[in-house]
Image (spheres, rainbow, N blue to C red):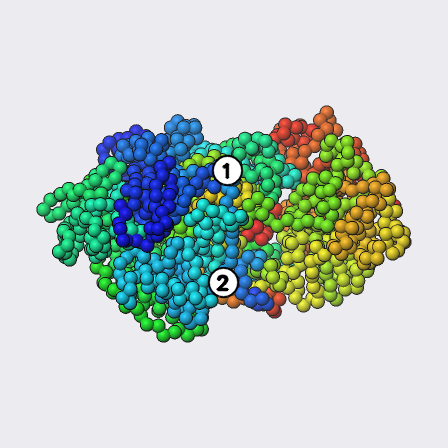
Amino acid sequence: MRITCPHCGERDRREFYYRGAAVDLERPAPDAGEEAWDNFVYLRDNPAGVTRDLWYHEGGCGAWIVVTRDTVTHEVLKTELASEAKS
Amino acid sequence: MRFSGLRVLKEGLTGNKGWTPHWRDPEPKAEYDIVIIGGGGHGLSTAYYLAKEHGLTNVAVLEKGYIGGGNVGRNTTIVRANYFLQGNSEFYSHSLKLWEGLEEDLNYNVMHSQRGIINLFHSDGQRDAAARRGNMMISQGDDAVLLGRDELKSMLPYLNYDNLRFPIYGGLYHARGGTARHDAVAWGYARGADQRGVDLIQNCEVTGIDIENGVVRGVQTSRGPIRAKKVAMVAAGRSGQVAAMAGMRLPVESHVLQAFVTEGLKPCIDHVVTFGMGHFYISQSDKGGLVFGGDLDFYASYAARGNLPTVESVMEAGVTLLPMISKAKVLRSWGGIMDMSPDGSPIIDTTHIEGLYLNCGWNYGGFKAVPGSGNVFAHLIATGQYHENATGFRLDRFRTGRGIIDEEGKGSQHNLH
Amino acid sequence: MRINGKGLIDRSKPVPFVFDGISYSGFEGDTLASALLANEQRLMGRSFKYHRPRGVLTAGSEEPNALMTVGSGPTQEPNVRATMQEIYPGLEARSQNRWPSLNFDLLSLNDLAAPFLGAGFYYKTFMWPKSFWEKVYEPAIRRAAGLGALSGRDNTDKYESAYAFCDLLVIGAGPAGLMAALTAGRAGADVILADESNRMGGRLLAETYEIDGKPGNVWADEVLAELKSMDNVRLMTRTTVAGAYDQGTFAAVERVLHHTERRPNGAPLETYWRIVAKRSVLAAGALERPVAFRDNDRPGIMTAGAVRAYLNRWGVSAGRNVTIFGNTDDIHRTARDLLDAGVHVAAVIDSRHDAPLSKDYQVLRGAQVCGSSGRKGLESITVRRPSGEERIHTDCLAMTGGWNPSVHLTCHMNGRPTWRRDIEAFVPTPGSVPGMSIAGACNGSFSTSACLREGIAAAGEALEGLGLTAPDIALPVAEDASYEITQLWAVPGKGRAWLDFQNDVTVKDVKQAATENFRSVEHMKRYTTQGMATDQGKNSNVAALAILADATGRGIPETGTTTFRPPYSPIAIGAYGAGAEGEGFKPQRFTTSHKASVARNAPMIEAGLWYRPSYFPKTGETTWRESCDREVKQVRDAVGVCDVSTLGKIDIQGPDAGKFLDFVYTNMFSTLKVGRVRYGLMLREDGYVMDDGTTARLGENHYLMTTTTAAAGEVMKHLEFVHQGLCPDLDVSFTSVTEQWAQFAVAGPKSRELLSGLLDQTLDDESWPFMACGQVEVLGVKGRLFRISFSGEHAYEIAVPARYGASLFDILIERAEALGGGLYGMEALNVLRIEKGFITHAEIHGRTTAYDIGMGRMVSQKKDCIGKTMSERPGLEEAGRERLVGLKPIGESRQLLAGAHLYNEEAEPVRTSDQGYITSVCYSPTLETMIGLAFLADGPDREGEVVKMVDHLRGVTTLCEVVNPVFFDPEGGRVRG
């Protein structure tokens, strides 16, 4: 598996750490309520198909990357820096 | 037909002409009391215990492919009851007791082999954690023995005791742990359920769940609509898609876990052995293949296949821990779709929709739970009450923080369990 | 029988070798199989279940029968395919899965019991009595099963792993692969051409056809010579491309030294390659199908393609009196090759009614072979014709049921092959592996000309994808015969007809499975074990599928296929795991004091990837406890020195650093004064404790965070995530400086004395109070000093750039010893911290909250932080939670054990009455008793109560008093003193 780091270019999967769905970028306000926080921390869309998830270029530049990816075919459709994807 | 050695002899002498189907292939009826979505190990055992223990036989198991085609047919076959947290401990203990009578119960040889499991540890801290675990196992009524290096050397002489990167300090031995023939478990439950009148419907994909005013009414399938008073979702790695049909979002992320088998070899590993400093577990099948596995690939996936970094890290653990196996050749690698939950423990519960039940979140550990899971889930569906050995697997535990059962201590990141 | 004038072996180089203790001779270029056949040794193995005598079936890596054990001792290698093993002087091979000998195998009795051992028989019996499974049945089954044996000793062979990158990977060097590589090579692409054989050329080496008027092998050699001359082309012989993975990644294994007895110092036996290719061409050829008929498994019965390969490539006739059976023109090709070589062809049995006739040999049209005889080797076959059955004497039957394209790699990424009616075979579905083009026989195109043509086309497709221009290349002239086939899966009749030779799966077994409703192809496979042998069904799956389709009244496409999964052919675990042997499993990290610690005889123990000293034994000390107690006393009474460099150190800089730290820590750091240190607690977003440590403010915009040794990597990832993912607008950056600084704890009442004179400044409470930090010069070296303590004593941590660590360590030891102190190791460090109730990851094990460890008040209510909201969930704060306490033994037993559980004094020690567990224990030389840290239900509310510790595993029960976890100096006077 190969992933293109926006900084470093295409690299082997071994350089990356996987965290989970990119929903982790959408942190609710502290008072958003139980449901919002349950949705953020625990519940997942878990799609069989295109998903956006978070990878960390641990063995490289240290960038957190949002990877748009197909969970059925493992095709990588898009990668972008988490710091830019959010805004 | 009752299976026995005598029957095998008789059939052998008469040309093996008398064998009959292990289960029927019925057309789906228009309505059932209970529809179970998912014909894997858990779905089949749920159907079996509904029929056997609760007399509920107007039941259909809907399977989109062939029965037993999910994780029950692609795991490393380990059966154990060595958990250390309340909630898990009593459940797996219950499940192991069901395993111990399973052949007799099902009249099917699932080859449950209580050959013993040894979890190795490699530091003082790991020894303390193993002791905490072993003490819980004994206090639950199960067996555990703490082994030192010398005892291990006589039991497992082939391990690397001399130049291992993380030396072996000892092991936690669980004598009643072992393995079983995974496919046979699915088939045995299928046959048992079928004999009691349950309809096993293969090649029948559920495409919708019918809900009216908060009450479940049935399902839509690739073979037409089926009405049902109760619907049970037991779809393992596919739980997210099934629950989505009922408008639910689950605390589950699906991940690929690979497993491996080597060419057949004469007996060389008599137990199940796990490595403590890298996720690695190995046993030898009765056919002679070394069956082993390790970590997830760690990325969400429905592909049921993995990639090389995990393959290598598993093999690396094998090579360092059991230097003799490096000559064994890997015959096949495959993947299963794991329904990873955020505390590593399962969910067996009702839902906010009346008549709709949920059983998922088995992480790596679904196979050994097959008897227990079906047993307690059947109890919940039939009686509306939690089984005494499965009160902790609540869907709302994450929201409330009450009764989170996190054996790995890794928290809400799904792939770390 | 060796045939003069045939074959590509080197007859000037005879090679002696040994099989089952008997010496034989072959020639350089021979495989074990070809050399044994040349010596007319047909019996080469025994089948798995019935222990039937078996000879070689094929001439390639798909061989199911002729598996042998090569070598002995630690490097003994089981299940070696005789068809792939090149012979070399000194080669010793043994047959396997037989006892006492290959000729006389007692377990061949199983064959007589075959009626009772059909598909799935074991699921129906061996259930009574229950206890017999583990004691009687299973051991007997295990002993009978299995093929070869591992040595049981540590494998001493070496393996290596490597990466390769290329524009184009061409898999298979037959006519299609050679043409593809040539086309791409001439276009300037970076090409890897890999082939599993020791010699490239594929079927060109096994057939007699010509290309451009030259023998095929000569043409292949010319192409190879040109490829070798190109810098942009790499040829990898003896290399099996075994798996296709995501984004153009392939696994391959190169058999580097299997063909020689020499093991040059350190050279690998095998190299495991990870090849990353922008594009690939699959030119893996096709595998010939046997035909199922009664007793089709006798030694001497083999595929027609194998018979031609042995003849044309190795100069061996597999028999002296050959019969040929099949359903394609290949049988005539076989007959002609044999006749040209002077081998007698007894009969050609062509199942096709319209088969061509020949002047040179007898053709039985519309006939089928329906049986064979010969106990340990073929003696005759029975042929069924419309006119009746006849027996023909023969010592070799060459059979063909057609060819299966090698679609395997195209299935590795879940691709499903497509059935082609015209060739009665599956072909790859285009697009199954992204970037892969398919050429030649593996695409169902069987003529030489078609292979060459498709090789050019596939390369052209790849070149286009690479943005390169395909060169003009002339299609070489070669045979372009059409492929005419009629279905021939199994010849009807009584008796057993084998499909999966190794696993002894017969046509009857598949039919029985269908009867028992194992109608799904996956069910049939799993029930009968069809296709689960070492060839993974390469020889038999399609035929078994056809028989299942027939038995269930479905067509082959509807019946579907099982999945081919990696590896294409078996790979040694040692190759995949190359480099991990022994201590190579994980990197080793050493502190700058490592050598000095080892020199003082300290046992070094693993701490993550680091090594740390356990204790420093002095002369006369005989147990670790003696040393540990002394080291603790030295710290409490004088001064101790300990290397703490392994703790994670993260340098944090930027105008928003304080604000950022407020967000990741539960407590405030923006208010911390420059020159001060604060203890911080970090939560995971789910509200549980992630890590703890001290963070120093070195400047207005500059902090230095300390993490635990274990969590350093996790914390770094976490900080980067919180910054980049949650608050990218904050101006702050992080650098791990763990390895850049050597850091030593100097602890004890004489710590100040020890340091004075070493530094450029005087240490007094005013300028260096507890929790002060700052830059110092250490004997002229710029360093840092932190007045912090993990022992409860007046203590410092002194840091210098790592290159000065070793020398500073020596100086610190000398000074400590002069003051009546010395070094202390991990054991003493642990005692010192337990005495003070300080936590480690034994307590913050991922399931505890700030509330549980008594630090609930450290979660600031003035601000938000990671984990705060979730830590306020009702379940994480309510009564009944197990919380941190101290324990002291009070009864007869004084022993505490980590991992023991706690119960009320009178309760039964069972799960339902469990009250908690002990996490850390030690003997406290300071308090002269064992003490422990534990988690106890509602613990802090129960100080003074008596609880019972029970350790079932070690048979210890101890009554304990619940106490405050700070056992020693609870007021904290010493640390300030």
Return the chain for callout 2: C
Residue A18 appears anywhere in the view: yes
Which residue position is annotated with label 1? C153
Task: Examine the image and state in which quarter residue B20 appears.
Answer: top left
Please tell me which residue lies in front, C34 or C857: C34
Q: Is residue C894 above or below residue B72?
A: above
Is B317 on the left-hand or right-hand side of C661? left
Residue in the image at 49% along x and 66% along y: A77
The mark total stands at 2
Q: Residue furthest left?
A: C387
Residue in the image at 44% along x and 65% along y: C233
What is the three-letter code of the residue carrying label 2?
Answer: Phe
Other residues around mark 2 within 10 Å, as few (<14) / some (14–19) / many (≥20): some
Q: Secondary structure at mark 1?
A: loop
Residue in the image at 55% along x and 44% along y: B320
Q: Is residue B33 above or below residue B389?
A: below
Q: Position of residue C15 (x, y in %)?
A: 37, 46
Q: Do the residues at pointers 2 and 1 share their chain?
A: yes
Q: Residue furthest top?
A: C892
Q: Secondary structure at mark 2?
A: strand
Q: Is there a contact, CB below 8 Å, between mark 2 and mark 1?
A: no
The N terminus of chain C sits in image quarter: top left
Q: Which mark is residue C165?
A: 2
Return the chain for callout 1: C
Report, in whole angstroms, how far the alpha carbon at label 2 lies from the one at label 1.
36 Å
What is the three-letter code of the residue carrying label 1?
Answer: Arg
Query: Which of the marked residues, 2 or 1, is nearer the chain's N terminus?
Result: 1
Q: Position of residue B306 (x, y in %)?
A: 47, 54
Please tell me which residue lies in front, C912 or C948: C948
Q: Is residue B330 above or below residue A12?
A: above
